[in-house]
Amino acid sequence: MKKKLFILLCCLCSIFLMANATEAAPKKMITIGITQIVEHPALDATRKGFIDALKDHGYIEGKNVKYDVQIAQGNMATANAIAKNLVGKKVDMILAIATPTAQAAVNATKDIPILIAAITDPVGAGLVKSLEKPGGNVTGTTDRSPVDKQLELEKKIVPNLKKLGVIYNSGEDNSIASVKAIKAEARKLGIEVVEATVTNSSGVMMAANSLVGKVDAIHVPTDNTVVSAFEAVVKVCQDNKIPLFAADIDSVPRGAIAALAIDYYRLGRQTGEMAYRILQGAKPGDMPIETLKDLKLAINLDAAKKMGVTLPKDILSKADIVYPKRARKK
């Protein structure tokens, strides 16, 4: 009798678990449109993190979710066309990566849920009413840089830093907000900011060259136009022994000396978690804009050497990631 009861209980438990699993798994195919201003490691990592987070919740590409990924190649007109195209397809959700594509998506629909990611100033860019209560059909994450901590780090690495070159796209709201913050923090440290602006990626090398002989170091903010052509800045800095710093850790293995910043993959995952809550019934406008509080310090030893910089031991000891990565000795 006890044996029969045990078998019966096991069967009931199996049925209960299977029923829960069925309820938890998405039951229908959904389409998520992803619009991204350009391709570069930080934004690509954001997209991957988003997709991986939803995969962990049972959204498997090709099985119950389809991702319609479109890249605007840095062109605002293309971004607007992509947004209208996704709305016309009646996708179930839109992930807009970077400010220009987020603005295009927000202008294109007030009905389809929009997740924004890698946005420096969501309020200033006109995407949401406030960080605490976005309102409407929009929520997501911000990648606002810890500019004060970044400049303090750069000052420690380059003690004689008096003039800091900043290269950015003057037509991108994300970058305008970043440079405004950089100037405010630089004044506190007695650093003068020397600007070099671009309108597209083809002008990045010329902008970098314009700073030669005028600055003690160069800082590249989270500007998608400049980061997409980051290697051009690296070449100018190596050729002229100008220390180069970035505002995203993904630019460090590409040639920046250092960056103290958020992990864009983790930011993407966090955005994906928010998307999951919306798919479960949460309203975007009631969900506060989120950010990552944990920062990572990435260092590139080869870049420092090529740019004539000796990294302080205390900075090296605090690094979370050191490039080039070397195999551990057995």
Image: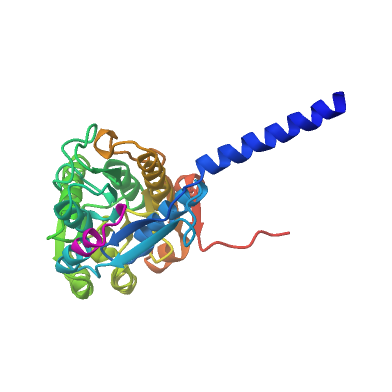
The quadrant in which residue 241 appears is bottom left
| Left or right of 56 on screen, residue 44 | left
- Decide which of 185, 264 is in the foreground and name it: 264
Q: At 35% across and 54% down in the image, what residue appears?
A: 248
Q: Is residue 312 visible?
A: no
Residue 89 location, x and y as percent? 26, 62
Residue 132 makes an appearance in the image: yes
Q: As drawn, is 57 to the left or to the right of 145? A: right
Quadrant containing the C terminus is bottom right
| Residue name at image x 80 percent, y 26 percent | 5
> Residue 66, how many percent across, how many down?
40, 60
Residue drawn at x 19%, y 58% as measured from the top left = 100
Residue 301 image point, x, y percent? 47, 61
Specify whether residue 316 is painted magenta.
Answer: no
Furthest residue to the top? 2
Looking at the picture, the colour scheme in use is rainbow
Left or right of 78? Residue 274 is right
Magenta stretch in the rendered image: 84-94
Residue 85 within the magenta-colored segment of the rendering: yes
Q: Quadrant of the N terminus?
A: top right
Q: Position of residue 150 (x, y in %)?
A: 31, 46
